[in-house]
Image (cartoon, helix red, strand yellow):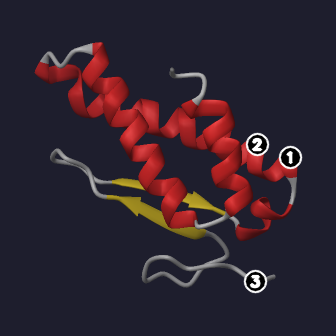
Amino acid sequence: MITKTLTAIAVATTLVMAPAAHAGSFEFSYNASEMDSDKGRKAALKRLVSEARDFCRDEFSASGTSLKQMQACRNETMSVVVDGIDDARFASLFNETIVVASR
């Protein structure tokens, strides 16, 4: 199995780190083989949405940040990860599913 490594780890999964505009940093792990099928890409995107939402909620919940700011955090975090994965089909799915839905 071929895996893409975007950070300095050598494991069966790939880790993408999104620099955050706040104290924490976001890490998203996926198996490169997930990018080989529609089902895998959809599963990875579903995990990404959930993990980014939880991360931003946890980062901002105590600070009284508005829902709009948390959503902006989530969207920015996901965009950085999608760019880091560098898979055109995954980016297209992200743009069709998340970006269009948020308009």
**Residue 56 point in image, percent of width and height:** 33, 33
Task: Tell me: residue 34, above or below residue 42.
Answer: below
Separation of residues labelled 2 and 1 (CA atoms)? 5 Å
Kindly identify the amino acid type of the residue bearing the numbered disc 2. Lys
98 left or right of 88?
left
The residue where tag 1 is placed is 39
As helix, strand or loop, the secondary structure at mark 3 comes to loop
Indicate which disc, 3 or 1, sits on the residue closer to the N terminus: 3
Locate residue 13: give its quadrant: bottom right
The residue where tag 3 is placed is 2
Q: Are marks 2 and 1 in contact (CB under 8 Å)?
A: yes
Residue at horizontal 18 percent and vertical 19 percent from the top: 65
The residue where tag 2 is placed is 42
Q: Nearer the viewer, residue 83 or 53?
A: 83
Q: Pointer 2: residues within 10 angstroms few (<14), some, or many (20+)?
A: some
Kindly identify the amino acid type of the residue bearing the numbered disc 1. Lys
Kindly identify the amino acid type of the residue bearing the numbered disc 3. Ile
Work out which quarter of the rendered image holds the N terminus and state it.
Answer: bottom right
71 left or right of 20?
right
2 left or right of 60?
right
